[in-house]
Image: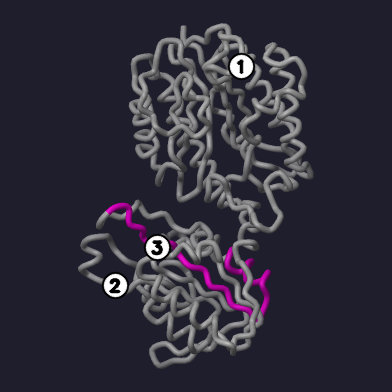
Amino acid sequence: MDKKQKEFHKSRREKFMQIIGKETMAIIFSNSLRTSSFDADYHFKQNKNFYYLTGFNEPNSVLILIPGGLKVKQNGKEKIVREILFVQEKDEKMETWNGKRLGEKNVNSGLGIEMGVLNSSLPEFFQKYLTRRIKNLYIDVVEMFDISGELKEYMTSFMNMLRVDAFHFQIIDAAHILGKMRKVKTEFEIEQIQKAVDITAESFEELRQNLKPGMFEYQAQALLEFNYKNRGATDNAYGTIMASGNNANTLHYETNRDKIKENDLVLIDSAAEYNYYCADITRTYPASGKFTQAQREVYEKVLVINKLCIKKVKPGVRFSAIRKFCDDLIAAALVDLKIIRKKEEAGRFILHGVGHHLGLDTHDAVPYGYGETFDNDTLRPGMVVTIEPGIYFKKGMKSVPAKYQGIGVRIEDDILVTKTGNINLSEVIKKEVKDLEKN
């Protein structure tokens, strides 16, 4: 990890501790490995709140923050620390199988966190320090109860201690605070998201130029995802949706097994992840290189809505206002296409919202469960949001003319809110009809 990234994670810990104040402690658990079948594990994905504060991507780890400082003894010496990271023990045999571990001795030099301790010391730490001068204990509650494997033993010990009558502090969900922090991105975070978008943009263009009828959806997916990795992506941001023809009307279609037919539209919702930050892009391409008249009519409606909604993204605007604006535009488009007679009939055609936060998670952290939703948010500089209107006409839908049935179109861009308006981070990804059609 370079100096700039260490400083970023350090700044997040400092801000979090400043918010929770003294006489508190925060305990943030990493994710643990999860078994997919028999002795095989799923690909490891870190708890993004834990990563936000540490930049550390190993499982079975716990970050403890003590804003008021804690006097601890290490190697026979006493010192006051505010940051402690509990990590897996160095183990030559396990590292031969699963890769190098950081180890407790390298926590400070590798991550910039004050103190590293073996995770096997957690029960002793909880027993010795948990009750001292603590009024509020902050825990990432949702992630805490999703722990398995090695951390489960330590978690059980911890939960048993919380049941002891002597404990008189209040337990507060840290995810609420971290979600609010993560909404507004720093310069470092915006750079990572832009890099993820740039990788996605180049990969989409490579696919657009090579897409053709007769390919299978999985072949188009493979070409796209190869280009992500070939350009330095750490992973896919999420499962690729490569939906040809009527499949585009299944919003989260991920089967990707059908053959792409002549005159199909192909809805592609996919993106790269870079340094654990996500892009989120959707484009809809004509497989044959030409839109049919009906496809073009629907596509151009969605494109206009996409552009008009992006113009609405600016500081001080509630996202609910953009959603209503988008819904009204879709309703008007449906009237123009003679799908409905009155705007009030549009409800069954509006299948999703207009966007969401974007960052370490594709649907980035919003503290749900506290009466907060994305629609309730007021946009602020530094937020990164998606704008993704769509119109969908599934085959067999009543009142939809036959020429439109089987057409599904969505166009999605990644938008940075600035002090004066917005910047479309994904503007370079082609979406004009003239740019998508081949001669």
Label 2, secondary structure: give it: loop
* Residue 198 shown left or right of residue 181 in the figure: left
Residue denoted by label 2: 90
Q: Is residue 210 magenta?
A: no
Could you tell me how many numbered marks the image carries? 3
Q: Which mark is residue 32?
A: 3
Q: Nearer the viewer, mark 2 or mark 3?
A: 3
Label 2, label 3: how many angstroms apart (C-alpha)?
17 Å
Q: Which residues are magenta?
A: 12-37
Q: In x, y percent, where is residue 431? A: 56, 22
* Residue 135 shown left or right of residue 1 in the figure: right
Q: Which badge, 3 or 1, is on the more N-terminal residue?
A: 3
Label 1, secondary structure: give it: loop
Q: Is residue 42 above or below residue 72?
A: above
Q: Amino acid at mark 3?
A: Ser
Q: Which badge, 2 or 3, is on the more N-terminal residue?
A: 3
Q: Which badge, 2 or 1, is on the more N-terminal residue?
A: 2
* Residue 219 shown left or right of residue 397 in the figure: left
Label 3, label 1: how many angstroms apart (C-alpha)?
48 Å
Q: Residue at coordinates 34% horizontally, 22% vertically from top-left? A: 216
- What colour scheme does the image use? one colour
Q: Residues within 10 Å of mark 3 (few under 14, many from 20)?
A: many
Q: Residues within 10 Å of mark 2 (few under 14, many from 20)?
A: some
Label 3, secondary structure: give it: loop
Q: Residue at coordinates 36% horizontally, 76% vertically from top-left? A: 105
Residue denoted by label 1: 398
Q: Is residue 35 magenta?
A: yes
Label 2, label 1: how many angstroms apart (C-alpha)?
63 Å
The image quarter containing residue 56 is bottom left
Q: Residue at coordinates 36% horizontally, 19% vertically from top-left? A: 259
